[in-house]
Image (spheres, rainbow, N blue to C red):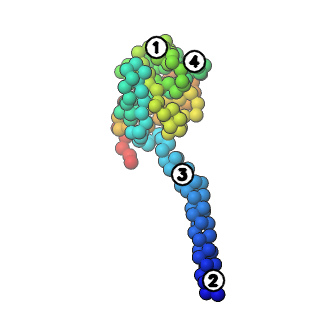
Amino acid sequence: MGTGRIRMESLLNGLTAVALAVALGFVIRDRVAPTLRERRIVDPGERIPSGILLRDLSTGDTVPLANLAPATVLVFLTTCPACESSTPAWREALERAPGSHLITVAVGDHPDARAWTARELPGMTTLEPLDVAGFLGSMRIRVVPTAFSVGADGRMLDRREGVLSPEDARTLLMAPRSRGTQAGP
């Protein structure tokens, strides 16, 4: 009777350990992992992570997004009608804010992204994310065009979605100069 009881206790202890491991797996999947993913999302006031890498379409060089600051970033898709209709406002804003640094980031898999930028926003640097899904998720980009400003300290200062007025575009262009060295965490 003693060995049977020991076997039963061992079996119950093993089943309990398996149940705890399964429960822990569910907690990690449902609670911990989403929290960690959410932490990587950048909102205004937060620092741009150094791991977001972009490739310059004219040179092929890879550069971290954080190293491009201070700048305003316009995220576009070459096949997006809203992106094309937004470019007159950006051209006007650039004329009214000389010396501003605008970077365009193409998120579509189109070989003509450089040509699109040269036609729509002449003289702008065009980049593409090495990890498009990671870039879109981290920067919380759900629609294009989306634009955001990054201050000299590497923090996102402001962001806007959709077609902007020339004044809104100018506000984004001026943000890195007027608020580029905010104090904060």
Sooner in the amino-acid sequence: mark 1 or mark 2: 2
**Mark on residue 33?**
3
- The residue lying at 53 percent from left, 38 percent from top is 137
Q: What residue type is labelled 2?
A: Arg
In-front residue for pair 43/136: 136
Where 113 falls versus 73 (above or below)?
Answer: above
Which of discs 1 and 2 lies nearer the camera? The answer is 2
Q: Which amino acid does label 1 sit on?
A: Ala
Q: Distance between the residues labelled 1 and 4?
A: 15 Å
Cβ–Cβ under 8 Å for marks 3 and 1? no
* Tag 4 residue: 85
The quadrant of the picture occupied by the N terminus is bottom right
Q: What residue type is labelled 3?
A: Ala
Cβ–Cβ under 8 Å for marks 1 and 2? no
Q: How far apart are marks 1 and 2 (CA)?
A: 80 Å
Measured as percent of width and height from the top left, residue 73 is found at 45, 28
In this view, which residue lies farthest toward the top? Answer: 119
* Tag 1 residue: 118
Sooner in the amino-acid sequence: mark 3 or mark 2: 2
Cβ–Cβ under 8 Å for marks 3 and 4? no
Sooner in the amino-acid sequence: mark 3 or mark 1: 3
In this view, which residue lies farthest toward the bottom? Answer: 1
Mark 1, Cα crowd under 10 Å, few <14 / some 14-19 / many 20+, is some
Which of discs 3 and 4 lies nearer the camera? The answer is 3
Measured as percent of width and height from the top left, residue 177 is found at 37, 30
Mark 4, Cα crowd under 10 Å, few <14 / some 14-19 / many 20+, is some
Measured as percent of width and height from the top left, residue 144 is found at 56, 27
Left or right for 131, reference 14? left
Where 97 falls versus 42 (above or below)?
Answer: above
Sooner in the amino-acid sequence: mark 1 or mark 4: 4
Secondary structure of the residue carrying numbered label 2: helix
